[in-house]
């Protein structure tokens, strides 16, 4: 989903275009003590997650029951700490896990993906690399490759378009 998803820590130090920065507002919120407090408070955490869902998947008409099924995972005792660390790490505000330094160095070298791959971009996902046709990361895939753009879909592609998502998984095995 969304193409080549290896976090580039060096690139993340540079500002993005304003519209892209705006889409990531919660990433910066999580870098603050206020964001930490919100993530540690169940009601605020769920309200924040619901707002993010509504924002990044504007056409997804999910119901309360769907949200609550997912929100049950937010109650895991380490959920807030893991989420906060992840976003702080992406901004180089927190160290990674030392035991994975060798793996991280390999990933930061931006390796090519050699296995058969189908990438999926959701048309309405605010995090999809422009122009949204897969060309922004096509050169990173050197094996059999196909790209699909799902019209009218936001960021939560597996839940918004489960059939298309599952079909891509099955089809990738046939490339």
Image (tube, helix red, strand yellow):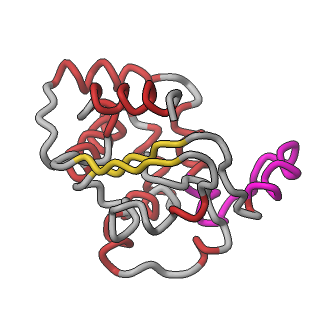
Does 171 appear above or below 111?
Answer: above
Picture coordinates of residue 8 (x, y %)? 64, 65
For image coordinates 40% across by 36% down, the residue present is 41
Q: Locate residue 147 relative to residue 98 in the image: left or right.
A: left
Residue 95 inside the magenta-drawn segment = yes
Q: What secondary structure is the stretch in magenta mostly built from?
A: helix
Stretch of the chain drawn in magenta: 87-107
Of 19 and 51, the residue lying toward us: 19
Q: Locate residue 54 relative to residue 120 in the image: left or right.
A: left
Does 138 appear above or below 22?
Answer: above
Residue 51 inside the magenta-drawn segment = no
Does 65 appear above or below 114?
Answer: above
Q: Locate residue 138 relative to residue 151 in the image: left or right.
A: right
Picture coordinates of residue 153 (x, y %)? 21, 45
Image mark count:
0
Of 46 and 129, the residue lying toward us: 129
For image coordinates 15% across by 48% down, the residue present is 152
The quadrant of the picture occupied by the N terminus is top left
For image coordinates 43% across by 30% down, the residue present is 171
For image coordinates 29% across by 51% down, the residue present is 149
Picture coordinates of residue 124 (x, y %)? 22, 55
Picture coordinates of residue 148 (x, y %)? 34, 48
For residue 59, what is the image quadrant? top left
Of 131 and 67, the residue lying toward us: 131
Q: Locate residue 113 relative to residue 21 in the image: left or right.
A: right
């Amino acid at each position: 989903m969304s193409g080549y998803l290896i976090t580039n820590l060096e690139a993340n130090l540079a500002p993005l275009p304003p519209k892209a920065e705006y889409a990531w507002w919660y990433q910066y919120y999580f870098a603050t003590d206020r964001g930490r407090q919100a993530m540690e408070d169940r009601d605020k955490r769920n309200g924040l997650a619901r707002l993010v869902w509504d924002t990044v998947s504007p056409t997804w008409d999910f119901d309360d029951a769907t949200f609550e099924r997912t929100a049950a995972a937010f109650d895991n005792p380490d959920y807030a700490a893991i989420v906060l660390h992840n976003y702080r790490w992406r901004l180089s505000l927190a160290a990674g896990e030392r035991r994975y330094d060798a793996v991280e160095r390999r990933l930061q070298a931006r390796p090519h993906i050699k296995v058969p791959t189908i990438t999926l971009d959701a048309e309405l996902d605010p995090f999809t690399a422009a122009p949204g046709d897969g060309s922004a990361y096509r050169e990173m895939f050197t094996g059999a490759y196909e790209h699909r753009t799902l019209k009218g879909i936001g960021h939560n592609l597996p839940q918004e378009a489960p059939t298309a998502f599952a079909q891509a998984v099955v089809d990738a095995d046939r490339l």
